[in-house]
Image (spheres, rainbow, N blue to C red):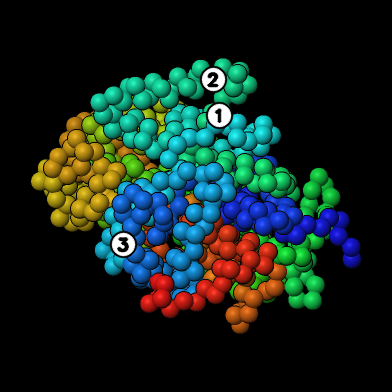
């Protein structure tokens, strides 16, 4: 049967992994088509912080912090699941830095290795910084065409000021902790936004690209400049298989189903299945309905199911990037909780009124703990984020903003926020025994004043202190809850996407149960089972592998064999 259109490579999805693959293939001279199911391109990458976890980068070395790939391999291997093969781990550790080096040259990106600690400091091979990389400055929307900018995925409300003004990480810290000169920082951010009169007359959207949007902007600009094509509202309907090889896909566009030929292959990069209620109930038990996710609403696992029908194997389907999330009425996506939990004058309790872990853990570790500790006697889903007036005046809690009076907060915040004159009164409002919560707070207060969390070690690790308030001593992550009024917000068990999915090899090829590759079919990002298994080694452990395996998959599809073999022994490479 003839094709309606033929390209060399078809990419399903438009996030960072997809665009890295598309750019890699386009730079190799391939005709590339990216198809996106949604009306906006960028996927979950667009609402992310934009960090990528890259061991052994040239940027870390240039900053005076060279990394040891043997250590990086040992760290990931210790954390990832036993069913993740060594070949895949080695491939990622060996090639992530190569991808980054190539991307800086080809997409005019400017990353910086950040002093951001790995998430498992107790695991051999971890580092206290310089594996997580961020685009350290903002990008103007002018790098994109008007059409591309208008159809770009919006930044997450959690990563923007007032849900509309994009900002950089250092600007976030200035507003969060308000050190000397913070007024100038916030004034500059606000002035830049409001003085952009042409855009203000046109839209409330900020034209400044930061974090996840900055990363995507650079990738899309480079892809467009290289002559690549991207279709919106064009979901893949089915794969085309001829002689046991994937040779293209049927794509629905403008009401018509088009047969798109892709002799070099099809790369699936269309996200996980966190928004599929049926699959969520089947695999992510006790994780709630799709609204508990911070993933994009279009992430329903369509291409995952298509690949399974083509004979693809799956792995760790019960796994997700679990996290504590705030859920506000009227919002279709949950808000990831990152910074709030590490700040002083706050605790997290279960529904019995007791603490159950180190609140300042990275979000994936705390989300995992929430799932593990949940029981009929002490429910952790939801938990309660409890804080006092000191916290309320100083720091934000998701959409609850400091300085602004309670009565002027948004209706969605006021609907779920609990407030009381005493800890005992607050306990009654959240359904907890007053005596239990009072005892929990009293014990925590004693430890906070001493600067040592004897129960769970909050504030001991570098990661805990990263988000603490250095003005608070002796421990920047600990502060007593003593000053009325007292507050509580429900904290739910959620996720930012699934990470179990299709089994792939070290170059992104989709595998069958017998280990053979399905010719012409690749998968990267959350549609593929993560190389990290059930763990989350450091900030950027989602985008880093998605982009690296996208880079490798496209290179293999285009016959760029210089990257093979990928089976070096640890003593030779990692």
Which percent across, then down, holds residue 296?
57, 47
Report which residue position mark 2 lands on.
196
The mark nearer the N terminus, 1 or 3, is 3
- Residue 385 location (% of width, % of height): 32, 43
In the rendered image, the vertical position of residue 316 relative to residue 176, given as above or below: below
Answer with mark 3 or mark 2, whichever residue precedes in sequence.
Answer: 3
Could you give the CA–CA distance between mark 3 and mark 2, rounded to whole angstroms? 44 Å
Asked which secondary structure carries label 1, the reply is loop
In space, the residues marked 1 and 3 are separated at their CA atoms by 37 Å
Foreground pick, 375 / 44:
44
Residue 437 in sight from this viewpoint: yes
Name the residue at 45% across, 52% down: 52
Dots 1, 3 in contact, CB < 8 A: no
Labels 2 & 1 near each other (Cβ < 8 A): yes
How far separated are the C-alphas under marks 2 and 1?
8 Å
Instruction: Tell me the tag on residue 207.
Output: 1
**Nearest the camera: 246 or 296?**
246
Task: From the top left corner, tell me how far across and down residue 63 is, in percent.
Answer: 34, 49
Find numbered disc 3 in the image and state the secondary structure of the residue it sits on.
loop
Q: Residue at x 18, y 37 (%)?
A: 472
Residue 5 placement: quadrant: bottom right
Q: Disc 2 on helix, strand or loop? A: loop
Image quadrant where one finds the C terminus: bottom left
Residue at (59, 22) in percent of width and height? 199
Residue tagged by mark 3? 126
- Mark 1 or mark 2, which is nearer the start of the sequence? 2
């Amino acid at each position: 049967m003839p094709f309606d259109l033929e390209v060399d490579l078809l990419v399903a999805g438009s996030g960072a992994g997809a665009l890295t693959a598309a750019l890699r293939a386009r730079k190799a001279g391939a005709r590339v088509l990216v198809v996106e199911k949604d009306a906006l391109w960028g996927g979950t990458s667009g609402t992310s912080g934009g960090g990528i976890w890259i061991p052994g980068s040239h940027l870390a070395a240039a900053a005076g912090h060279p990394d040891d790939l043997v250590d990086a391999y040992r760290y990931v291997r210790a954390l990832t699941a036993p069913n993740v093969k060594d070949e895949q781990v080695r491939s990622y550790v060996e090639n992530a830095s190569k991808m980054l080096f190539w991307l800086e040259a080809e997409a005019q990106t400017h990353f910086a290795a950040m002093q951001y600690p790995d998430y498992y400091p107790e695991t051999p091979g971890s580092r206290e910084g310089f594996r997580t990389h961020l685009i350290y400055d903002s990008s103007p929307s002018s790098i994109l065409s008007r059409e591309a900018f208008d159809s770009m995925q919006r930044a997450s409300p959690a990563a923007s000021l007032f849900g509309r003004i994009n900002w950089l990480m250092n600007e976030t810290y200035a507003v969060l902790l308000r050190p000397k000169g913070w007024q100038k920082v916030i004034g500059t951010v606000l002035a830049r936004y409001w003085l952009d009169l042409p855009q203000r007359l046109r839209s409330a959207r900020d034209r400044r690209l930061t974090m996840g949007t900055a990363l995507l902007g650079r990738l899309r600009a480079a892809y467009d400049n290289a002559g690549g094509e991207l279709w919106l509202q064009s979901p893949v309907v089915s794969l085309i298989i001829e002689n046991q090889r994937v040779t293209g896909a049927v794509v629905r566009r403008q009401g018509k189903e088009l047969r798109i030929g892709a002799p070099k292959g099809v790369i699936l990069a269309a996200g996980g299945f966190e928004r599929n209620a049926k699959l969520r109930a089947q695999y992510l038990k006790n994780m709630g309905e799709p609204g508990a996710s911070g993933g994009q609403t279009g992430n329903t696992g369509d291409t995952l199911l298509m690949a399974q029908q083509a004979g693809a194997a799956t792995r760790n389907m019960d796994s997700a990037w679990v996290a504590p999330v705030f859920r506000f009425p009227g919002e279709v996506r949950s808000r990831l909780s990152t910074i709030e939990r590490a700040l002083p004058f706050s605790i997290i309790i279960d529904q019995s009124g007791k603490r159950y872990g180190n609140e300042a853990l990275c979000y994936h570790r705390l989300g995992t703990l929430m799932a593990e500790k949940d029981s009929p006697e002490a429910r952790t889903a939801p938990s309660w984020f409890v804080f006092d007036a000191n916290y309320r005046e100083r720091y934000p809690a998701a959409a609850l903003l400091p300085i602004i009076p309670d009565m002027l907060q948004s209706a969605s915040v006021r609907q779920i926020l609990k407030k009381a004159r005493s800890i005992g009164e607050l306990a009654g409002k959240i359904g907890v025994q007053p005596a239990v919560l009072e005892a929990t707070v009293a014990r925590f207060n004693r430890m906070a004043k001493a600067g040592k969390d004897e129960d769970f070690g909050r504030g001991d690790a570098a990661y805990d202190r990263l988000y603490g308030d250095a003005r608070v001593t002796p421990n920047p992550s600990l502060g007593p809850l003593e000053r009325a009024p007292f507050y509580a917000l429900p904290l739910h068990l959620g996720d930012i996407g699934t990470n179990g999915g299709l089994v792939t090899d070290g170059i992104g090829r989709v595998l069958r149960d017998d280990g053979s590759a399905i010719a012409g079919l690749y998968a990267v990002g959350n549609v593929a089972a993560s190389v990290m298994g059930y763990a989350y080694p450091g900030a950027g452990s989602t985008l880093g592998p998605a982009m690296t395996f996208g880079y490798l998959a496209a290179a293999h599809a285009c016959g760029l064999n210089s990257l093979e073999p990928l089976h070096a022994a640890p003593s030779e490479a990692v």
